[in-house]
Image: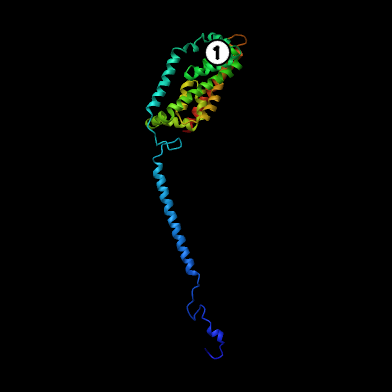
């Protein structure tokens, strides 16, 4: 200790600086150890997450395909349901060709009138039910629309024919969806790319495509509903599109049917022809517009 230096100052240990090395604080080694432990825990957690993700990816390859899976993953077609689809179509063809063919003939109105009158006040309900069954198996709906106009007048006839045709088309759609969608539809898409592209387009634009197909001057309600059932079109788009698509020609057919009863028939025939021509022109314009875009 130098003379004149206070005793307390001389005995104090040197602090950091040039006089000597700094003494580390007592708590720092423990903090470093805790940091190392935390880093190790984070690394182990990341490794475990990576292993879980790899295991999940491996298991997902064994999960059967759903409607949200990519179209490239195609289930093997079910022979049982494929045969059921073919049997349904064959049965409908046989029914329309033989037992039900008279429903679309010129004498159908007289037979339907007798059937409807036999049900009394329930006659309109019976007509809708018969219309639905006939349309579901392929009887032309326009024949029932014309008969409805002759039996109930053009306005009530159009409404009854509309509801009967809607129910019948929903039944056909359901048969195509249950028997053909997940089996026949995917099989067609995998082996016939052009047909698969058509089904895909119908699925993406189910509402509008349904309307346009039903407004076209050619085509058949039965085949349109089967196509929609096999395609990825949703049930909601099908029902709404079918209702809108059927309505104009239900009115046209009912106008023609009511005009056949006589009376002031000229305005009804003119209105029916004008509506049919307008629908045909609209469909032609839409097709040309789509081709121009593509």
- State the scheme by which the image is colored: rainbow
Whether residue 287 can be seen here: yes
Q: On the image, numbered disc 1 is attached to which residue?
A: 147
Compared to residue 57, the image places residue 116 above or below, namely: above
Compared to residue 11, the image places residue 84 above or below, namely: above
Residue 34 location (% of width, % of height)? 47, 64
Residue 4 in which image quadrant: bottom right
Q: Secondary structure at mark 1?
A: helix
Residue 104 location (% of width, % of height)? 49, 13
Q: Is residue 161 left or right of residue 43?
A: right
Q: Nearer the viewer, residue 230 or 127?
A: 127
Residue 81 location (% of width, % of height)? 40, 26
Most extreme residue toward the right is 264
Q: Is residue 255 left or right of residue 229?
A: right
The residue positioned 41% from the left and 19% from the top of the image is 90
Q: For the image shown, how many numbered marks are present on the structure?
A: 1
The residue positioned 40% from the left and 21% from the top of the image is 87
Compared to residue 69, the image places residue 79 above or below, namely: above
The residue positioned 52% from the left and 19% from the top of the image is 132
Residue 251 location (% of width, % of height)? 57, 18
Q: Nearer the viewer, residue 33 or 286?
A: 33
Residue 183 in which image quadrant: top left
> Around disc 1, counting alpha carbons within 10 Å, would you say few (fewer than 14), some (14 to 19), or many (20 or more)?
many
Whether residue 284 can be seen here: no
Compared to residue 72, the image places residue 179 above or below, namely: above
């Amino acid at each position: 200790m130098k003379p004149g230096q206070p005793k307390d100052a001389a005995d104090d240990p040197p602090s950091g600086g040039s006089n000597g090395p700094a003494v580390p604080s007592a708590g720092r080694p423990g903090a470093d150890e805790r940091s190392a432990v935390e880093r190790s825990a984070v690394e182990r957690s990341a490794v475990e997450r990576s292993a879980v993700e790899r295991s999940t990816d491996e298991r997902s390859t064994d999960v059967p395909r759903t409607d949200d899976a990519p179209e490239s993953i195609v289930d093997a077609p079910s022979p049982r349901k494929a045969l059921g689809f073919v049997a349904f179509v064959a049965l409908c063809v046989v029914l329309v060709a033989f037992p039900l063919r008279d429903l679309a003939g010129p004498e159908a109105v007289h037979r339907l009138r007798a059937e409807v009158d036999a049900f009394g006040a329930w006659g309109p309900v019976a007509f809708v039910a018969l219309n639905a069954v006939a349309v579901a198996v392929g009887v032309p709906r326009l024949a029932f629309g014309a008969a409805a106009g002759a039996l109930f007048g053009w306005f009530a006839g159009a409404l009854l024919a509309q509801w009967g045709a809607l129910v019948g088309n929903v039944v056909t759609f359901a048969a195509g969806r249950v028997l053909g969608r997940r089996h026949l539809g995917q099989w067609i898409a995998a082996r016939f790319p052009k047909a698969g592209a058509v089904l895909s387009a119908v699925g993406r634009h189910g509402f509008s495509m349904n309307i346009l197909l039903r407004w076209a001057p050619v085509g058949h309600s039965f085949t349109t509903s089967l196509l929609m059932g096999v395609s990825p079109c949703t049930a909601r788009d099908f029902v709404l599109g079918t209702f809108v698509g059927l309505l104009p020609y239900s009115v046209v057919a009912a106008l023609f049917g009511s005009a056949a009863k006589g009376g002031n028939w000229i305005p009804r025939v003119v209105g029916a022809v004008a509506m049919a021509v307008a629908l045909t022109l609209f469909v032609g314009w839409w097709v040309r517009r789509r081709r121009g875009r593509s």
